[in-house]
Image (spheres, rainbow, N blue to C red):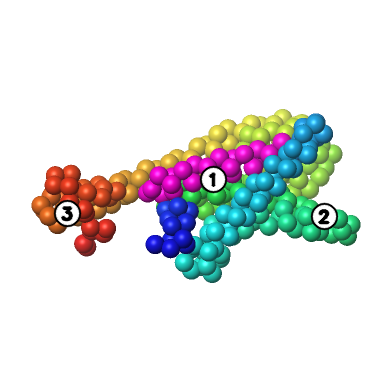
Amino acid sequence: MGWRERIGRVIFETDTPAARTFDVVLLWAIVASVVAVVLESVPSVRAAYGPALRAAEWTFTLAFTVEYVLRLLTAGRERRYAFSFFGLVDLLAILPAYLALLLGGTPYLAVLRALRLLRVFRVLKLARYLGEASVLAQALTASRAKITVFLTFVLTAVLVVGAAMYVIEGPTRGFDSIPTSVYWAIVTLTTVGYGDISPQTPLGRALAAALMIVGYGVIAVPTGIVTTEIARAGDRRDAERRRVAELRVCGACGLAGHGEDARYCRRCGAELPERAAG
C-alpha cells in the first residue's frame, strides 16, 4: 500500500483507530477555529488578545490547508472531490483568509474583507460526523409538499390580515402601507412582537389578538409534520438495517442475521463478505 492509500484511509475512512483519532482531532480543531473567529469579533477581547487570536486563526488556516491538499492528493478522483459539497466547504474554510491577506490592503477592495465571514462554513464540516443526517434529509424531502401548502396558507393569511389592518388602522397609526402592515402581521403571527408597530383601535386589537392565537398553531403544525416524517424515515432505516442483517450469511457455517457493521461470524469467526448478496 502506497503513501496515498495509507493517508487516504486515515482521512476518508472511520473504521481504524488512526482514522477515528484524525476525525476527533479535526472536529476539535474546527470548533476551536470557530471559537477564535467569534472571540475576535468582540472588541474588548480583540483589544486584549488580538495578536494571539490572529496567530491561532492562521495556525488553523494552515492546518486546514494541509488537510485540503492531502484530501485532493488522496481522494483518487481529485476533480470529483474538489467539486463535491464537502470539497467546496473545505475550500471555503481556507480561501477567505488568503483573499483577505492578498486584498486587505487595497482600499477599493476593502469590501472583500467580508469574505472572511465565510470561515463560518467550517461549521458545515461537522455534518460529516452526523450519522442521522440522511434520516433528517429524507424527512424534509417527504414533508416538502405539506410544508409548501402550509407556507402558502401562512403567506396568504398574513397578506389578508395585513391588508385588513392597513384599512382598519391607517397611516396615522403607523400602518402607512400594505407591506408595512404585512411585516407587522408576520411579526405578530410568529409571536416575535417587536412592538415597533401596534394597533390602537379596538377592532385592530381584536384582529391582532386573533392572529396571536393562530400563531401558536403556526408554530406547532410544521413541527408535527417534520417530526412524523422523521419517525417514518427512522423506521424505514431500521427496517433496511434488519433486512441487510438477515442477508448477511456466513459462507463457512451458514449463520445469518449478522449486523451490517460486523466483519466476522459470531459463531465460527470466519470473515464475512463485504456486501450481502441481493
Q: Secondary structure at mark 1?
A: helix
Determine whether, in the image, residue 77 is placed left or right of residue 108. left
Query: Please, is residue 78 above or below residue 6 in the view?
Result: below
Q: Amino acid at mark 3?
A: Val
Tell me residue 163's x, y (percent).
70, 47
Of marks 3 and 1, which one's residue comes earlier in the chain?
1
Label 2, on which residue?
Answer: 104
Outermost residue to the right: 107
Mark 1 burial class by Cα count in 10 Å: few <14, some 14-19, many 20+: some
Image point (49%, 46%), residue name: 22
Residue 144 in sight: no
Span highlighted in magenta in the image: 14-39
Query: Upstream in the sequence, badge 2 or badge 1?
Result: 1
* Closer to us: 177 or 75: 75
Percent of width and height locating residue 237:
33, 49
Residues at discs 3 and 1 in contact (Cβ within 8 Å):
no
Given this view, does label 2 or label 1 mark the residue nearer the observer?
1
Number of residue marks: 3
The answer to whether the residues at label 3 and label 2 have Cβ atoms under 8 Å apart is no
Q: Disc 2 residue type?
A: Gly
Q: Which residue is mark 3?
A: 249
Helix, strand or loop at disc 2?
Answer: loop
Q: Position of residue 99 (x, y in %)?
A: 75, 58
* Real-space Cα separation, disc 3 to disc 2, in angstroms: 61 Å
**Which residue appears farthest toward the front when viewing the image?**
2
Q: Marks 3/1: CA distance? A: 36 Å
Residue at 49% of width from left, 50% of height from top?
128
Residue 245, percent across and down?
22, 50
Examine the rendering and report whether any part of residue 113 can be seen: yes
Numbered disc 3: secondary structure: loop
Nearer to me, 190 or 130 = 130
Residue under label 1: 26
